[in-house]
Image: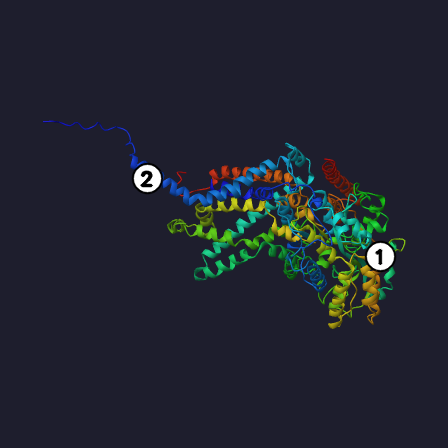
Amino acid sequence: MGTRRVGLCGTVAAAGVLALGACASGSGEPSEADVTFGSDAAMSGELTVMGFGTGDDVAQVRYDRATEELGDDVEVSLVEGDLDIQAFLSAVAAGDPPDLVYANRDQIGTFASRGAIMPLTDCIAAEDVDTGQFREAASGQVTFDDVVYALPEFNQVQVTMADSSLLSAAGLGIEDVNGSDWDAVTQATSALVRNDGGALSVIGFDSKLPEFFPLWAKANGADLLSDDARTAQLDSPEALEALELAVSVYDAQGGFPAVKAFRDSADFFGEGNQFATHTLGAMPMENWYVNVLNEVSPDATLAFDTFRTREGEPLAFATGSAWAIPAGSPNAAAACRFAATMVEQESWLAAARARADARAESGQVFTGLLTGNADADEEIRSTLVEPSGSPVWDEAVEAVYEANENTFSLPANPADAEFKAAWQDGVNRVLNGQQEPAEALAQAQEEAQSALDDAWAEWDERSDG
Amino acid sequence: MTTTTAAPVAAGPVAPTAAARSRSRRNLRSALLFLSPWILGFLIFTLWPVLYSAYLSLTDYDVINDPQFIGLENYRAMATDPKIALALTNTVVYTVLAVPLHVAGALGLALLLERAGRSSGFFRTAFFLPKMTPPVAVGVLVLLLFNGQNGLVNEALGAVGIQGPYWTTDQTWIKPALVLMSMWTIGSTVIILLAALRQVPSELYDAARVDGAGFWRRTFAVTVPMISGTIFFVVVVNTIAAFQMFTEAYTAFFGSGNTTYANEAALFYVIYLFQQGFENLNMGYASAMAWLLFVIILAVTLVQLAVSKRVVYYEGDQK
């Protein structure tokens, strides 16, 4: 009897957790119409911001400006750390949402389609937010069904990073590993890879699957999702060809399990990183890693370039963050002003100046700041980014800024988590040898389309009703 | 002279007097009063969510908007969802591998500890300490210890001339790695079994020795039968825990920013339930999954109970 009770309590705990989240439900549709936004509106009360912290100078400087803009009558409190989606949605459902949330941009479509966040049309108009300054890829991720639901900020982009000494020793150059020539990538991989007693000792080229599959696909001309975000396009011939190439790179080095185990064993953020220890030939990687390398191994033999399409054009897959106002936000007017101040050009410039000063003080290179705001990016680069005295790091900065001008993103959609899971699982099935690329992408296509169809049907029904 | 006649005494039980009835009611009220915190907690935090999740399993519910009743659609969808079958298979394989190993390992250690004499206390603490490690840390440890390139496990295997596999990146070896890692928390089972071992009457061992029984004979003919009730308890509890495997595997293979390629081998049922409920916001579907898991565990436990009637000995049984 006792054991059965243990079983009962233990097993239905998951069900209980689910039900607790449902005790209050249905906060309803976006309620922007109930809010008076505006530059002249008196700001007061509390402002609770979820998912944002002031852990670095760029965040702190902009936060100070935003709180100053709100005035002394608004008390701002931060729920720091990454946005806890469960806590956020439960709070919205319970009718007690935070005033403002800081989320990943790819979450915005799902939040908007569920009515968890409000459209920002009136907020943008009232606070004179110049949405034309936002980079197109960033705007696309926060615009759902032609309505802007969040203010984007930051841009993460990928560039090609390589060990120049390994390249030289193999008679190769950065152009052999920047993606512009797939045959060259394959040959460079074979030329750079090293095995020591049966174990991998140098990874020739890491194509960074599964996470960079959209980048490889786009480089081959494939959009994984249609412009209206309603149709998955995972099994196109171009996407298939891209997956085959990116996987073949691992196959040529003993298979993905070996490469990943070796990659996982590296001191990624420390002085013993793969480039400093000459154990990685090249890889596409996000721009923040330039700063890591500059800090921990400034003298490493490195080469940088943009990641390139097969036509040789620079290309990057943009990701970033965004500010959204929950439906039912008790202080939406203050939330709007706070968010608008955080993403305005002057705030970015002040933040970048603080960052540049701090880097100069510690004798490090200021590699720029990608804000998601094109005008801010340009001003920061022209006024604060200076030649470092090292051609390597200047090359890195050049590559990052060039990549930033050539970004794409997946449009906001109501089933982002399922869509992402579908293509990642598909790529994983190929990497672990369960399926051939064509079969894996066909299954991924079916799963992704099914999730999109269901989510869009619910949205259409809700917006029609 | 007057005579009084006593009322005839009833032959049956004595009817309670009004005072006794009142005392009984007071006792009941007091008992309920003292129990009320637990009763309220049970009703609000266990029974109500359980019943509500049963209702939610019949709805399409995304947390934000009101649940829409859809009958048995979630259960029908589960029947055709290949990930349900995959997650259940992974979970059953893990349970079948982990529970016997866990119990056998714990019994072996408990037998050793029983013979450890005065140092038993130190070793009891040493074996139990890893149990205090947060499950998230255990998940990280899996990746460190079982790294195929330079993990401690493969280093040890290499020292004896064995080239270890890619435990954390090879689909075939992920579940065995998690099973081995589950031994990290063997301490609590060891302590429970050790307590049971110390209840075995020493005269039984003396009698066995007189009859010429050696260690193994005594273990299997005396020790195991005498502690079979406790062994059954730890088997049931560990089976339930194995079916609910989540934190270690999620941390190692599905945690924030972790897009490792071998996820499917570590997709346990509760992880998939979590993904459906809290990542895909399909709370109705996740509730249906929770009820399926409840039914499965209940069925497994009932089978274990049925089997236990044949193989488990409780002191005082007439068998």
For the residue pair A235 and B299, the one nearer the viewer reads as A235
The location of residue B43, given as percent across then percent down, is: 50, 41
Q: Both on one chain, marks 2 and 1?
A: no
- Disc number for residue A170: none
For the residue pair B154 and A216, the one nearer the viewer reads as A216
Q: How many marks?
A: 2
How many C-alpha atoms fall within 10 Å of the one at disc 1: few (<14), some, or many (≥20)?
Answer: some
Say whether residue A210 is visible. Answer: no
Quarter of the image where one finds residue A347 = bottom right
- Disc number for residue A405: 1
Give the alpha-carbon distance from disc 2 to disc 1, as whole Å: 85 Å
Q: Residue shown at 83%/46% (left/top)? A: A223
> What amino acid type is highlighted by mark number 2?
Arg
Which residue is the site of mark 2? B23
> What amino acid type is highlighted by mark number 1?
Glu
Chain identifier of the residue bearing label 2 in the image: B
Q: Secondary structure at mark 2?
A: helix
For the residue pair A289 and A74, the one nearer the viewer reads as A74
How many C-alpha atoms fall within 10 Å of the one at disc 2: few (<14), some, or many (≥20)?
Answer: few
Q: Residue shown at 50%/39% (left/top)? A: B305
Say whether residue A340 is visible. Answer: yes
- Residue B196, relative to residue B66: is it above or below? below
Quarter of the image where one finds residue B185 = bottom right
The location of residue A345, given as percent across then percent down, is: 78, 60
- The residue positioned farthest toward the left in the image shown: B1
The location of residue B238, given as percent across then percent down, is: 54, 47
The location of residue A20, given as percent across then percent down, is: 58, 43
Q: Secondary structure at mark 1?
A: loop
Position of A282 with respect to A18 (left or right) is right
For the residue pair B210 and A347, the one nearer the viewer reads as A347
